[in-house]
Image: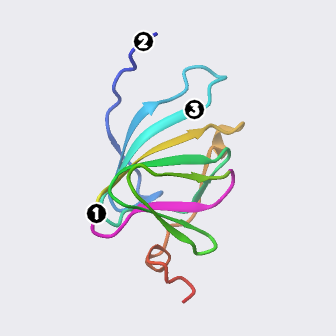
Amino acid sequence: MNIEPAAPTVKNPPEQFHGDVWLDRIAAPHDADQRMTVALVRFAPGARTAWHSHARGQYLRVTQGVARFGDREGNIIEVHPGETLYTPPGQEHWHAAAPGCFMEHLAMLEAGDDPATTTVWKEHVTDAEYEGRAGA
């Protein structure tokens, strides 16, 4: 057993995030046969990911604030502290802080067989998609 060293907080890149989003790594694989990654992710009000998917799906446990999650069908789900959202493998989605509040969630996922497919990033989410008025 060992206590994991604290990793510095990093600001997520603008190529994959709109607004200010910070990440604290909690767990990452040590050996080639391990797959689990866990991170605490904090979003400023209105900040959001770009569209993306995960090879093995993802669990997101909201710990503070109000989260907003969207899919390609235009569904937007608000998730509150203590609730966990699951996105299945390959489902394109985005996550964000609701307007007017910070949001924090634990992100839990497993690496894909090809590490390049663990998370596949796409285009940025538009304001209309974030606000639920895309195609309106």
Q: Is 54 positioned to the left or the right of 132 in the image?
A: right
> Which secondary structure, mark 1?
loop
* Residue 87: quarter of image: bottom right
Q: Earlier in the sequence, mark 3 or mark 2?
A: 2
Q: Is 51 positioned to the left or the right of 9 in the image?
A: right
User: From what the image shows, is residue 107 above or below residue 136?
Assistant: above
Which stretch did the figure color magenta?
89-100
* Residue 135: quarter of image: bottom right
Q: Residue placed at 36% from the left, 66% from the top? A: 98
Q: Earlier in the sequence, mark 3 or mark 1?
A: 3
What residue did someone put label 1 on? 101
Q: Residue placed at 46% from the left, 52% from the top? A: 83
User: From what the image shows, is residue 89 above or below residue 94?
Assistant: above
Task: Please count the marks in the image.
Answer: 3
Q: Amino acid at mark 2?
A: Asn
Q: Amino acid at mark 1?
A: Cys
What residue did someone put label 3 on? 36
Q: Is residue 94 magenta?
A: yes
